[in-house]
Image (cartoon, rainbow, N blue to C red):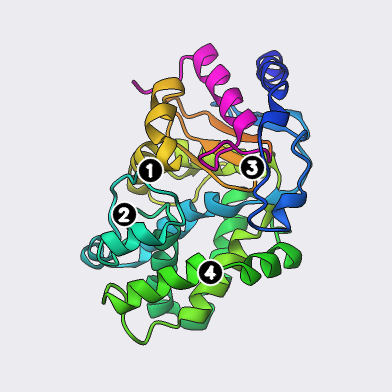
Amino acid sequence: MEELLKKAYDKSIVFAKEGKAADYIPELGKADITKAGVSLIDLEGNIFSYGDTEDKFSIQSILKVVFYLLALERVKKEKLEKTIGVKPTALAFNSVMDIELAEGKPRNPFVNSGAMASIALLYEIYGDDTEDLIFEAAKNLMGDNTLAHSEEIYQSEMDTAYNNIAIINLMVGKGVLPEDTPRQKVLETYIKTSAILVNVVNLSRLSSIIANNGYDLVAGERKFDEKYGRILRTVMSTCGMYNYAGEFALNVGMPAKSGVGGGIIAAPKTGHGIATYCPGLDEFGNSLVGTKMMEIISKELDLSIY
């Protein structure tokens, strides 16, 4: 397995300088786009990794999977389905136009509007304990009790959160979220938890649990009900790579979720947990090198679900 990861890394890292860091968030724009790593957990719970696997980066939109999982577990099904859709979008993940065209209802839980809607629904139940709930879930699902956010990235994102402010106001204005939604708290929780620093091994732990329907092969214990694994993987397949989801399905064929911090997780049909990292992004906001590594691993191990 180590040879496969090295092969995927070596064949992909040569494209590193073609990517671009997410400089619309100034702090993320400082990332070294030549850094890259890959981690894979096999069916026995063994962890293999190669590259810059100890480097920390912000989890960003990959945490939307956790937001949605918590909402699936805790919000009534009818209310969740009324508030958040599961349709792919052809527009950017932070598009204000998309939420306006949809009359305030998020297309899916993996765009910014859907993530904030998930958090808003949790605030209705847990109030000011919501942020701690998310942090603890992240630590539990990634097997690392030391996880914490970057204050620098958090502040940088808050200073440039214009689209997100508009999006949450539109959701309230259109009546999808109630008028008493604590909009500022939802926004702050969304941005702070998205700034959690992880490494690629942390992400492979998360992807392995999703691939195994909530069972943690490394720890030997169940983390969530198996019925949610199928839901997460289905929506990851159609919406996890933003408006590149169709091409990713053709070329890689695994349920996946990316983040503009440079990480990607994939949860294939076999039960392997795979994660890649490189902060240079393509035009869709997905890691360019990370996507190429995923494609090589998928083909070598025949992991495509199609």
Circle 4 sits on which residue? 162
Q: Over which residues does the magenta segment extend?
A: 279-306
Compared to residue 70, the image places residue 251 above or below, namely above
What residue is pinned by disc 2?
A: 107
Cα separation, mark 4 vs mark 1, equals: 23 Å
On screen, residue 97 above or below 231: below
Residue indicated by mark 1:
239
Verify CB contact (< 8 Å) between mark 4 and mark 1: no
Callout 2: SS:
loop
Q: In the structure shown, which secondary structural element does the residue marked by tag 3 occupy?
A: loop
**Which kind of residue does numbered mark 3 sit on?**
Gly
The residue carrying pointer 1 sits among few (fewer than 14), some (14 to 19) or many (20 or more) residues within 10 Å by Cα, namely: many
Point out residue 271 in the picture as x, y percentages from the top left corner: 47, 29
First reached walking from the N terminus: tag 3 or tag 1: 1
Q: Which residue is mark 3?
A: 262
Callout 2, which amino acid? Arg
Q: Secondary structure at mark 4?
A: helix
